[in-house]
Amino acid sequence: MSLEPRHLCNGLIRRSIELRALYRHAAAQVNEPGLRSVLDEEAQSLNEVIAELQAQMRSSDSTPVTRSRMIAVARRRLDLWLLRGMPRSDDAWIRLLARHEQSLLRAFERVLVRVAPGDVTTALHRQLPRLQSIHLDMHSLAKAAGH
């Protein structure tokens, strides 16, 4: 695997790890039990995306990332601080997660355009429907929340 696909794939893994952490945290913070279950399921789906992309990189003799960036930790803390003051925090979590999910989906789509066909693109194409499903779930939740 050349440097660019490896770098791009690791970037997607890192972003997925960061979003999974946000889903897990949101699931622990929301009030609605049904929403908590949905968020836990979405975190599990992202876990599967991450595991497959990491396995793909290992099979290509590349070292996949296994954690998020420090800036992501700081950004998540800022998001959490802003959400504390929100009167309808479940709705705020939904909006925040929907925005981050849309960003991750767009990042996957951009990488698919940039990387030449091969094992990496095959792995990304396999994960794209899973990400689209998560995106649709969050979009539906955001719509139901009135945003």
Image (tube, rainbow, N blue to C red):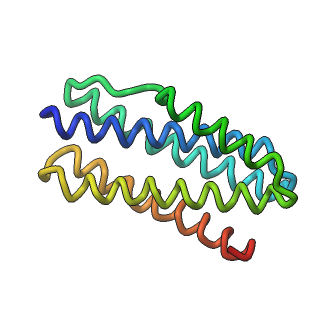
Image side of residue 43 versus residue 53, left or right: right
**Picture quadrant of residue 20:** top right
In this rendering, the count of numbered labels is 0
Image side of residue 143 versus residue 122, left or right: right
The C terminus lies in quadrant: bottom right
Work out whether 144 lies above or below 117.
below
Instruction: Report x, y in % for residue 143.
Output: 67, 76
For the point 14% across and 48% down, the residue is 118
Instruction: Report x, y in % for residue 142.
Output: 67, 69
Image side of residue 12 versus residue 138, left or right: left
Image side of residue 35 versus residue 128, left or right: right
For the point 71% across and 55% down, the residue is 93
For the point 59% across and 44% down, the residue is 44
Instruction: Report x, y in % for residue 56.
Output: 29, 36
For the point 37% across and 43% down, the residue is 12
For the residue pair 133 and 102, the one nearer the viewer reads as 102
**Picture quadrant of residue 4:** top left
For the residue pair 10 and 44, the one nearer the viewer reads as 10
Instruction: Report x, y in % for residue 38.
Output: 70, 56
For the residue pair 147 and 112, the one nearer the viewer reads as 147
The N terminus lies in quadrant: top left
